[in-house]
């Protein structure tokens, strides 16, 4: 009988007498989900060379290349996408049935690692987490930008990420979480000086602009959506913290665009003034993204379900 780990026939595909090893399929699926041998090794508790060896063994058995190696991670071949689609549900179901290791039921659950935009975390998420903590859920919160947070999610460093856009590809599960409306605001002093000009966007060129970043991602989006044009100017003040941007504008520095949830209190008190109230304001949907695979921590699902329910009132 031919050794099951060899494929000397020269034919493409797997021999009927050599069923695929579930451990190899599990490693393959983890690499496919994370897009990285290194990240997959971390999640599986293996060394990176072991993961590489297992993938090569599976490729030999199948007679196909599964991944294209790149400078950062790997890209699945079309056949790898097909294979992942065929095995993902059976392997995840098997992992769920297997459950935690013996004795794990008596141990406290691991902390849930949750990440997202700092402003949304502090304003909306953290104030509503007390019931979970009271129920014994431990949390590790990380603020940051969506792109690097999603990379860390794929690498196994987070369980849940609140993303400001839907992740590309099919390896991550993303559920719509909440819609945030963007508003154009200034201090009462600047609002009074501006008055009600016929062309607000032109008048604002004489007002200092306070922004989150040099490339004005939020302000430019507002300009395109509401005024139908491209904003061509540089900000007078930048600060990668929307709370700081809000504080500067409320103090009279100039104008900016903010999520309404972040400045609702200041608009109600008069510390900030709405400069424009379009019928169709720009809206951005945030998504709750879960780490690939089946988590062995039951508290991940509790936090996920809690956030999906709480977001209706944000």
Image (cartoon, helix red, strand yellow):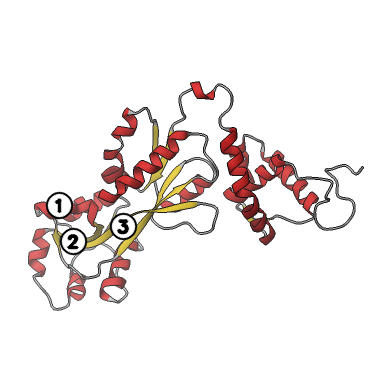
Question: Disc 1 vs disc 2: Cβ atoms closer than 8 Å?
Answer: yes
The label shown at residue 179 is: 3
Q: Residue at x 72, y 47 (%)?
A: 55
Measure the alpha-carbon separation of dots 1 and 2.
10 Å
How many neighbours does mark 1 have within 10 angstroms: few (below 14), some (14-19), or many (20 or more)?
some
Q: Tell me where residue 91 sits by quadrant.
A: top right
Do the numbered discs 3 and 2 sit on residues whose CB atoms are within 8 Å?
no
The crowding category of the residue bearing disc 2, from other C-alpha atoms within 10 Å (few below 14, some 14 to 19, many at least 20), is many
What is the spatial separation of the Cα atoms under label 3 and label 2, in whole angstroms?
19 Å
> Quick one: label 3 or label 2, which is nearer the N terminus?
3
Where is residue 25? Give x, y as percent: 69, 45
- Residue marked by disc 2: 185
Mark closer to the chain start, 1 or 2: 2
Other residues around mark 3 within 10 Å, as few (<14) / some (14–19) / many (≥20): some
Is 193 on the left or on the right of 98, as rendered? left
Element assignment for label 2? strand
The residue lying toward the viewer, choosing from 227 and 254, is 227
Q: x%, y% of residue 312?
A: 29, 50
Frontmost of labels 3 and 2 is 3
Does residue 301 appear left or right of residue 8 in this picture?
Answer: left
The quadrant in which residue 293 appears is top right
Query: Residue 213's quadrant in the figure?
Result: bottom left
Checking the image for residue 266, the label placed there is 1
């Amino acid at each position: 009988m031919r050794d099951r780990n060899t494929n000397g026939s020269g034919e493409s595909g797997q021999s009927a007498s050599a069923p695929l090893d579930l451990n190899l399929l599990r490693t393959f699926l983890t690499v496919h989900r994370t897009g990285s041998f290194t990240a997959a090794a971390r999640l599986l508790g293996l060394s990176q060379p072991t993961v590489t060896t297992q993938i090569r063994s599976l490729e030999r058995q199948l007679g196909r290349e599964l991944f294209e190696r790149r400078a950062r991670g790997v890209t699945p071949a079309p056949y790898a996408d097909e294979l992942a689609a065929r095995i993902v549900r059976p392997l995840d179901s098997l992992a769920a049935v297997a459950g935690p290791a013996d004795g794990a039921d008596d141990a406290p659950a691991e902390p849930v690692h949750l990440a997202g935009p700092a402003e949304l975390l502090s304003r909306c998420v953290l104030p509503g987490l007390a019931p979970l903590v009271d129920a014994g859920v431990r949390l590790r919160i990380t603020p940051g930008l969506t792109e690097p947070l999603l990379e860390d999610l794929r690498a196994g460093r987070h369980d849940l990420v609140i993303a400001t856009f839907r992740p590309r590809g099919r390896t991550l599960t993303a559920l719509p979480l909440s819609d945030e409306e963007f508003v154009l605001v200034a201090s009462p002093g600047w609002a009074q000086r501006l008055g009600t000009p016929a062309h607000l966007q032109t008048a604002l060129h004489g007002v200092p602009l306070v922004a989150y970043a040099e490339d004005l991602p939020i302000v430019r989006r507002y300009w395109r959506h509401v005024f139908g044009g491209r904003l061509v100017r540089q900000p007078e003040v930048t600060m990668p913290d929307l709370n700081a941007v809000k504080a500067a504008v409320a103090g009279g520095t100039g104008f900016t665009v903010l999520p309404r949830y972040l400045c609702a209190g200041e608009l109600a008190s008069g510390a900030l003034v709405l400069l424009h109230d379009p019928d169709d304001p720009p809206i951005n949907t945030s998504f709750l993204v879960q780490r690939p695979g089946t988590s062995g921590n039951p508290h991940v699902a509790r936090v996920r379900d809690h956030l999906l329910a709480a977001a209706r009132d944000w």
